[in-house]
Image (cartoon, grey):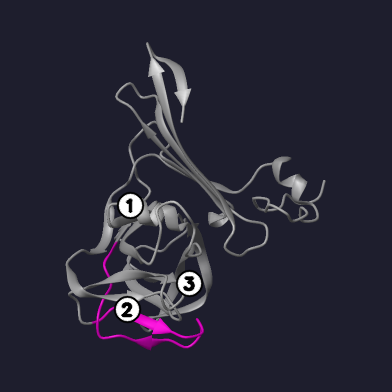
């Protein structure tokens, strides 16, 4: 059998990609989180300014913890301008992890995750991004990078912190310029102590699934995202709530 292709959602009106049917015929590279883990690096005091994702790459430097070798999730203060909670007027946002060289991103992405506008719009300002990575070096600088997305009237903004350094921008993702401000973020390890999975990330962020649970430990919500086969603004997204009676499933909305 040929190599299993990465998960990719079909797009209405388009033929399936060659070999795409094989995506369901084998195992995929997956990372699992059991709880949120512990914050290992952060800047949480915001300023009154923002940075747009339209037309520029944004990067924020951070250092892994003294024993940290993995990331379980990243939270950043992110919001939309001209966005919608129900329709995708802004294309999905990509957050990536890069190595650091002299305070700037370098090389190719070590890990990435894609999140859609509805997910960002509905979040309580602190947006959880299921960026997961392993094999990191403790006590080492890395970079969080958001790729350009949006237009002059519809885009995302990343809240600046009260720091006077730590971030950088780029017009092409290759040449970077250090900025005189930081960006608000939290980086978590993947040392959650729960017994139930809270996040499953497949194929380095092409597909992710979030689970929440009720007081009885039964699934309460299941949120799924899968990037589309055409690699543009199309994707498959669902957010379902589960209801129970006497411990038995009675509805999925």
Q: Which mark is residue 145?
A: none
Quarter holding residue 141 = bottom left
Give the magenta part as a residue range: 165-185
In the image: residue 141, left or right of residue 251: left
**Where does label 1 land, which residue?**
123
Task: Tell me if residue 177 comes above or below residue 251 in the rendering.
Answer: below
In the image: residue 208, left or right of residue 193: right
Q: Which mark is residue 167?
A: 2
Q: Earlier in the sequence, mark 1 or mark 3?
A: 1
Which of labels 2 and 1 is toward the front? 1
**Which residue occupies the foreground of this view, 186 or 50?**
50
In the image: residue 178, left or right of residue 11: left
Answer whether residue 130 is visible to the viewer in this image.
no
**Which residue occupies the foreground of this view, 60 or 51?**
51
Q: Residue furthest top?
A: 246
**Where does label 3 land, which residue?**
149
Q: CA distance from mark 2 to mark 1?
A: 23 Å
Q: Under tag 3, what secondary structure?
A: loop
Q: Earlier in the sequence, mark 2 or mark 1?
A: 1
- Check contact, mark 1 vs mark 3: CB within 8 A: no
Q: Give residue 82's position: percent from left, percent from top.
A: 38, 67
* Magenta-colored stretch includes residue 177: yes
Which of labels 3 and 2 is toward the front? 3
* Magenta-colored stretch includes residue 121: no
**Which residue occupies the foreground of this view, 46 or 107?**
46
At x 33%, y 52%, the residue is 123
């Amino acid at each position: 059998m040929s190599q299993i292709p990465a998960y990719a959602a079909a797009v209405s009106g388009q033929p399936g990609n060659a070999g795409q049917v094989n995506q369901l015929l084998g195992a995929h590279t997956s990372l699992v989180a059991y709880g949120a883990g512990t914050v290992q690096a952060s800047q949480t005091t915001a300023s009154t300014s923002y940075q747009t994702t339209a037309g520029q790459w944004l990067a924020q430097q951070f250092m892994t913890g003294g024993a940290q070798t993995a990331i379980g999730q990243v939270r950043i203060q992110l919001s939309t301008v001209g966005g919608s909670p129900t329709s995708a007027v802004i294309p999905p946002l990509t957050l990536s992890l890069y190595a650091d060289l002299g305070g700037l991103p370098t090389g190719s992405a070590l890990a990435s995750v894609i999140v859609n506008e509805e997910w960002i719009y509905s979040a309580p300002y602190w947006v959880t991004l299921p960026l997961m990575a392993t094999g990191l070096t403790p006590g080492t600088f890395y970079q969080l990078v958001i790729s350009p997305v949006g237009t002059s009237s519809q885009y995302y903004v990343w809240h600046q912190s009260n720091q006077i350094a730590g971030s950088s921008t780029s017009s092409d993702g290759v040449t970077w310029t250090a900025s005189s401000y930081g960006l608000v973020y939290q980086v978590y390890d993947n040392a959650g102590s729960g017994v139930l999975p809270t996040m499953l990330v497949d194929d380095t962020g092409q597909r992710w699934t979030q689970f929440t649970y009720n007081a009885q430990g039964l699934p309460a919500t299941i949120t799924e995202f899968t990037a589309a086969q055409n690699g543009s603004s199309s994707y498959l997204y669902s957010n379902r709530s589960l209801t129970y009676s006497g411990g038995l499933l009675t509805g999925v909305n």
